Image: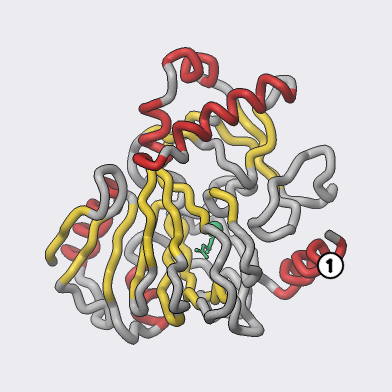
Amino acid sequence: MDVSKLSPSIGVLIEGLDLELPLDEVAGAELRGLLAAHHLLLFRAEALSPSGQIGLLSCFGHVLDERGDGARHVFVSNNRPDGVLGLGRRLLFHSDCTFADPPISVLSLYALEVPEHPSPTLFASAIGALRRLSPELRARLEGERAMFLSGFGGGYERYFEESAPVDSPRAVHPVIYDDPVSGEQVLMIDELLMDRIVGWDRVHSEEARAEAHRSLYASDNLYVHHWRLGDLVVWNNVAVQHGRPALPDGGARTLRRVAAMRSEAASYTAWTAHALEKYAAARDAG
Ligand SMILES: O=C(O)CCC(=O)C(=O)O
Ligand SMILES: [Fe+2]
């Protein structure tokens, strides 16, 4: 396989691998090493089957049945009745399922439909962000934990503990978090799911959050992926946060999503019929 860098801190393009064929142990180990070192892998794979994508993801862990229907893939789409995250609004930066413990390990999206106008996904290095944090803030965050929660609104609005539904899923994580996939420490403070540093008053927590975001979302800490048909992007969900600007008006955009967990024990079904009903109800109410 041929490997070339996509940006200074995030991502490599991998060429010369047929993803429809089963991967042998040597190739699997090489890909795990590349993901550990670079956090995001890009493949150009025209007409990739669902089983090709699932087969690749299974070399990073246990593939999730996110819809609870056995398909082991869902569609992020503004153009399919069964699609999720279909509104064209901006998606705030996040790592998926940090409202659970542990969060999802590895995510992938495969471009099945791409609009004529650009529709990027943005990736921010949570490892780079920790390294560039001021020594003062880093010292204050050492040993601290934060509350992460979902309010079933999709990825468009931040959630607050005071106003989130009582049954919204939530978890507490260290803000300087040991990421098992890369073996690195990451800054786990995002725009969408992190509510507050536990035990801090709102004002100080918001100040720290804003300063963390300046490190995270600085343009030289990002990799911007402009989708082309047949692109498959696989990334470390904890080491790299993702978000997307508002979609262009008109134009179908469909990305097939497959997710994997390092631990067999965890099983997330974020897009079951029950969860989708809750999302729809929250959207209608808001
Ligand atoms: O649509 C995108 O670019 C990102 C979607 C997303 O946040 C996800 O699949 O987890
Ligand atoms: Fe996401």
- Which residue is identified by label 1? 284
- Asked where in the image residue 159 lies, by quadrant, the reply is top right
Position above or below: 138 against 89: above
- Relative placement, left or right, of 68 versus 257 is right
User: Quadrant where the N terminus lies?
Assistant: bottom left
Amino acid of disc 1 = Asp
- Determine whether the residue tagged by mark 1 lies in a helix, strand or loop: helix
Q: Relative to 116, say whether 107 is above or below.
A: above
Crowd rating for badge 1 (residues with CA inside 10 Å; few <14, some 14–19, many 20+): few
- Tell me if 192 is positioned left or right of 265 in this view: right
Q: Residue at x 32, y 64 (%)?
A: 59
Q: Position of residue 55 (x, y in %)?
A: 35, 74
Image: 103 above or below 227: above
Q: Nearer the viewer, residue 113 or 245?
A: 245
Quadrant of residue 82 in the image? bottom right
**Where's ligand 2: which quadrant?**
bottom right
Residue 163, image x, y percentages: 84, 43
Seen at 52% across and 58% down, the residue is 244
Residue 142 lies left or right of residue 157; in this view the side is: left
Q: Residue at x 38, y 46 (%)?
A: 222
Toward the viewer: 60 or 166? 166
Total numbered labels placed on residues in the image: 1
Q: Residue furthest left?
A: 2
Counting from the top left corner in percent of width and height, residue 265 is at 54, 56
In the displayed structure image, the side of residue 78 where residue 163 appears, left or right:
right
Q: Residue furthest right?
A: 285
